[in-house]
Amino acid sequence: MFVSVVIAAYNAEPFLCDLMESTLGQTHEDFEVVIVDDGSTDRTLELLREYEKRDDRVRVISQENQGASIARNRAIEAARADWIALMDADDTMEPNRLERQIAFIEEHPELHLAATMVIHIDADGREIGRSVPVLTRHEEVEAAKQRGDIIGFHQNTVLMRRDVFQAVGGYRHEFWPGEDMDLWARIVYSGYRVLVQPEYLVRYRVHGSSASVQTREYRENVRWIHTCINRRLNGLPEPTRDEYLRGLQNEPLLTRLNIKRIDTAWVFYRNATLAFATGNRIQAAYQVVIASILDPLHAVPKVIRKLRQSIPGTRSAH
């Protein structure tokens, strides 16, 4: 099966060669790589052009900086395959990623999108943790939909049908940061079938530049996406972000304070993960303590789960 591997790259020089070598070294060889350089100011474009000359499966598109969602939309528009494999420019694939994902969708022909689990690595490529298996059965996906949950996938693991991506309208830049969550929501709640393959096929790098997703703005967007889901399910138009924020201001003070408490705890917990990945254990411990004080019902179980994942013999067998 022919696959288009789609990548948006911006100032990705430090990790670009790792990405490209892991991609071009796949055991499944029938694919193309479509990369949009989003106005990089380092040597990213130069390195990509070198790969383009060396391997005719690589196609490079250059544009002025417009943001990752616009770059990905452009890459997918240029893709030639019916199936799109997403990848981030600072991560790497396991050698059999495409082979195993293709086998999975051939075993599950009802699927329109399949994701996998990830191994978390630091800037030097050392493993620091693994994702937890979720949504690996249709029953789990349907239960999440019945609850009106936001269903999330690791973007760099997704293999999806190109026509489904086009049918739901692709990435929407206004939802950044969080535009991938918005895309999955529109795919899932439009009735398309999705599953997470219970295999670790991608290495997700956590490093200093990952900080853009650790913000309250991201949390606000996640809540906005959830509101959009509920509105669509009830046949109502989606609110703009400004409309959502104005509506939030009309909530009772205690409700707004509680939301702020939970979101602040989430930011501290995510920043603790980043601090741990970058070797700052003292800062990580401080962030964890604050998160646990602000939201013990959610933060403490996460910390326990992370600790269990770091102890040999306690991880999933996959």
Image (cartoon, grey):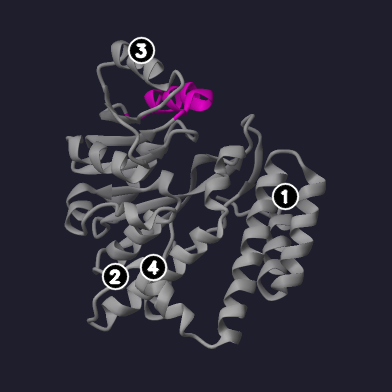
For mark 2, give the secondary structure: loop
Residue 237 in sight in this render = yes
Q: Give the number of the mark in front: 4 or 3.
A: 4
Q: Which residues are magenta?
A: 11-28
Q: Give the number of the mark in front: 2 or 1.
A: 2
Give how far apart the Cα atoms at labels 1 and 3 are.
Answer: 39 Å
**Residue 4 position (above or below residue 47):** below
Residue nearest the viewer, comparing 255 with 77: 255
Query: Mark 1 and mark 2 in contact (Cβ < 8 Å)?
Result: no
- Counting residues from the N terminus, which is met first, the one under dot 4 or under dot 3? 3
Q: Main secondary structure of the magenta part?
A: helix
Q: Which residue is mark 2?
A: 189
Residue 243 in the image: state x and y as whole percent.
35, 73
**Residue 275 position (above or below residue 38):** below
Residue occupying image coordinates x 72% and y 65% = 291
> With 30 as the anchor, is 65 left or right in this view?
right
- Disc 3 residue crowd, few under 14, some 14–19, many 20+, Cα 10 Å: few
Q: Give the number of the mark in front: 4 or 2.
A: 4
Residue nearest the viewer, comparing 50 with 132: 50
Give how far apart the Cα atoms at labels 2 and 3 are.
Answer: 41 Å
In the current view of this chain or complex, which residue is farthest to the bottom?
Answer: 252
Q: Which residue is mark 4?
A: 225
